Amino acid sequence: MTAPERRCTARAAAKINLALRVGRPRQDGFHPLATIYQAIGLYDDVTVRDADQWSVRTHADAGIDLSTVGDDESNIAIKAGKALAAHHGLSRAAAIDIQKAIPVAGGMAGGSADAAATLVALEELWGLDTSVEDLLRIAADLGSDVPFALYGGTALGAGRGELVTPIDAPANLWWLVVPHEIGLPTPSVFHHFDQLELGDEEPVIDEALTAALAAGDIAAIAATVSNELQPAAYDLRPDLAQRHRLLDELGADAVLLSGSGPTQLLLFGDVSAARAAAGELRDQGIDHVLVPAPVAGAHVLEH
Ligand SMILES: C[C@@](CO)(OP(=O)(O)O)[C@H](O)COP(=O)(O)OP(=O)(O)OC[C@H]1O[C@@H](n2ccc(N)nc2=O)[C@H](O)[C@@H]1O
Ligand SMILES: Nc1ncnc2c1ncn2[C@@H]1O[C@H](COP(=O)(O)OP(=O)(O)O)[C@@H](O)[C@H]1O
């Protein structure tokens, strides 16, 4: 009798930025950030199996463009797996399957979610006991917002975004997520931000937002969310500025660009109002998904 195949599935959430303040580029080219991340109920699932060599396959429903997602070493999930194996001096490999719901190059850190889910899934499959500090260091080396994908919830991000501190944010929020069929590469938005000379001396988070989050005051949260990459992204993509004006008419508590875009977000405290806005988008043929937040970080789903 052959032994049953060993596999593990982990789930990781998309992120949004409730605040995104950006400084001028550092010596290493990265921008200092002060951000508040929030994990939203839109997930990629990653399944790992023991294998003789590394491989990755990515699947998605219609509407998600996988054309820039490699099935080789360029896929961040393989990078994550190899980094974890190298950290433990293991010569093991895994076959990785990614089921994507997070739009690619959408400003919602889908690749980072896949990296975090791969780390968590392999940790379980291989029975590793990597310390939290080491796991966060491996995550930070993979990408600026991979550490947050491990944490989930709501958190402050500093440094280039990799230094994460969870914060108290008890309100149940509803986000109407409006993806866009044409992605927007993160480096091009940061580059345009520099061309427009928009960088702060030292980016800091507005204390009114952390106070509003701690109090669960949705009107105050809505009044203080902001994204400093939004003007650069809209300057590159006037179609997004145009869509923002349309979204402004849907009765949301706030409308904002997700990270470097192009996904746009409508904030609602009231789920009935959110459903009504979703109905209007459906009538206009605009793709959307309504999700709750905050949600948990990367976690094992099935083993
Ligand atoms: C902008 C943000 C906001 O949360 O998210 P997205 O909109 O991409 O999801 C993040 O900072 C993206 O994080 P992530 O996508 O992990 O970035 P990385 O892989 O580390 O870097 C990709 C590229 O983005 C630029 N970059 C990223 C982070 C940073 N603090 N400064 C930068 O200038 C650099 O050009 C870098 O080469
Ligand atoms: N597993 C992955 N999922 C998505 N994109 C990936 C992955 N691995 C590598 N990439 C590359 O990273 C780019 C940006 O990824 P993504 O995390 O979806 O966007 P964003 O940085 O806007 O949040 C993609 O266009 C793709 O070329």
Image (cartoon, grey):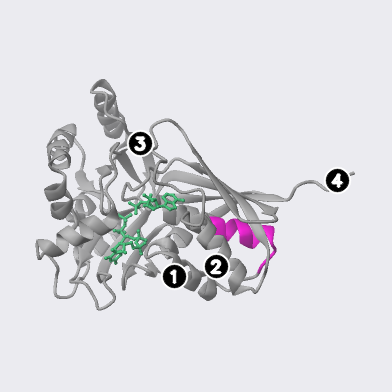
Earlier sequence position, callout 1 versus callout 2: 2
Distance of label 2 from label 4 (alpha carbons): 30 Å
Any magenta on residue 14?
no
What residue is pinned by disc 2? 83
**The disc label shown at residue 290, or none:** 3
Specify which label sits upstream in the sequence, 1 or 4. 4
**CB contact under 8 Å: marks 2 and 4:** no
- Helix, strand or loop for disc 3: strand
Local packing at callout 3 (Cα closer than 10 Å; few below 14, some 14-19, many 20+) is many
Which badge, 4 or 3, comes first in the chain's sequence? 4
Q: Which of marks 3 and 1 is in front?
A: 1
Residue 203 falls in which quadrant of the image? bottom left
Per the model, the C-alpha gap separating discs 1 and 2 is 9 Å
Badge 2 density bin: few <14, some 14–19, many ≥20, Cα 10 Å = some
For the residues labelled 3 and 2, the Cα–Cα distance comes to 34 Å
**Magenta stretch: dominant SS?**
helix
Residue reaching furthest top?
A: 283
Count of numbered tags: 4
Q: Is residue 215 left or right of residue 57?
A: left
Q: As rendered, which of 153 and 288 lies closer to the eye?
A: 288
Q: Do the residues labelled 1 and 2 touch (CB within 8 Å)?
A: yes
Which residue is drawn at the image coordinates 25% and 63% (left, top)?
A: 211
> Residue at 26% of width from left, 68% of height from top?
33
Residue 172 lies, in percent from the top left, at 36, 47
Q: Name the residue under label 4.
A: 2
Q: Earlier in the sequence, mark 2 or mark 4?
A: 4
Amino acid type, residue under disc 2 in the picture? Ala
The residue carrying mark 1 is 141
The stretch in magenta equals 118-128
